[in-house]
Image (cartoon, rainbow, N blue to C red):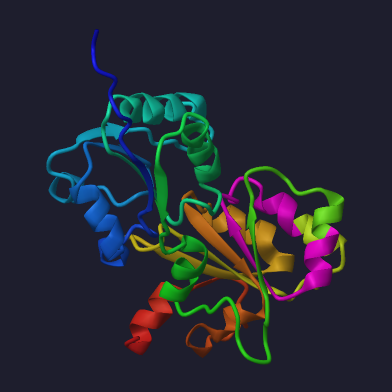
Amino acid sequence: MSAQIDPGTVTLVGGGPGDPDLMTVGALKALAAADVVLCDRLAPRDQLAEWAPNALLIDVGKTPGHHAVPQEEINRLIVEHALAGRDVVRLKGGDPFVFGRGGEEIGACRELGIPTRVIPGVTSAIAVPASVGVPVTHREVSRAFTVISGHAPLSADELDGLVKVGGTIVVLMGIGTLPQLGAGLLRHGMRETMPLAIIERGFHPERRTTLATLGDLVRVLGEVQPRSPAIVVIGEVVRQSAGLSLSKSSVDIDSLLAEAGA
């Protein structure tokens, strides 16, 4: 009769917004001890072999509109390796519990009594705007911020609530539905002159940031044709980026920051 194998552990690790320098100490320790690492597309990956030298590396990344590895299969892989006695790290971009389906993965493990823990990560919702000088809150400008998923269009009630709450709106995974979001916010009373920033590829060397106003959003989208991954910030805090003026409806922040020596 074979001996029963004690399950390993499962650790959900937030890899931050893509810059290896923003990985936490806890994240690096978990990777160093891992037997298996299941990695997302937007998680820091370039140094993964160095960070997890003894681990089996499994790519379970998803691209917009194409989930090569369905979530159910990811859950199954996590559980399978843990039940075989392996220490599993699920490495995710940003923070595991900010639109990362981390709750589903932890739930699948807990149902089977697999020990779990979570190592939070720096969320791109805050870090990416900060990287171009846009604070999500600012004294006497915005005392609240709302993070929303743009994966699907918002309902009329959700749009109305966003406008009434005020403050800053940060949109993740929202490039595909941005025209509908802009039109919906205008329809529910947000003014056309509200500034916004579209920040593509966050901490990547080819980052591109575009400033616009809500009323001119459709034209600007046609001009710059932004692509995922991108963060969209809507609110007066956008004006805080290096004190830039929005006299033009579409401005490349990165070029202006470079000219200013920022």
How many discs mark residues in the rendered view? 0
Residue 28's x, y, as percent?
24, 56
Is residue 57 visible to the viewer in this orientation of the structure? yes
Identity of the residue drawn at 68% across and 82% down: 143
- Pick the quarter of the image with the C terminus: bottom left
Give the vertical position of 11 relative to 67 (above or below). below
Toward the viewer: 222 or 205? 205
Give the vertical position of 85 relative to 34 (above or below). above
Residue 138's x, y, as percent?
60, 86
Is residue 46 visible to the viewer in this orientation of the structure? no
- Pick the quarter of the image with the N terminus: top left
Give the vertical position of 144 relative to 112 (above or below). below
Task: Tell me the magenta residue range.
Answer: 160-182
Identity of the residue drawn at 29% across and 20% down: 4
Quarter of the image for residue 236 reads bottom right
Residue 181 drawn in magenta: yes
Residue 16's x, y, as percent?
38, 59
Q: Is residue 51 left or right of residue 245?
A: left
Residue 44 drawn in magenta: no
Toward the viewer: 136 or 220? 136
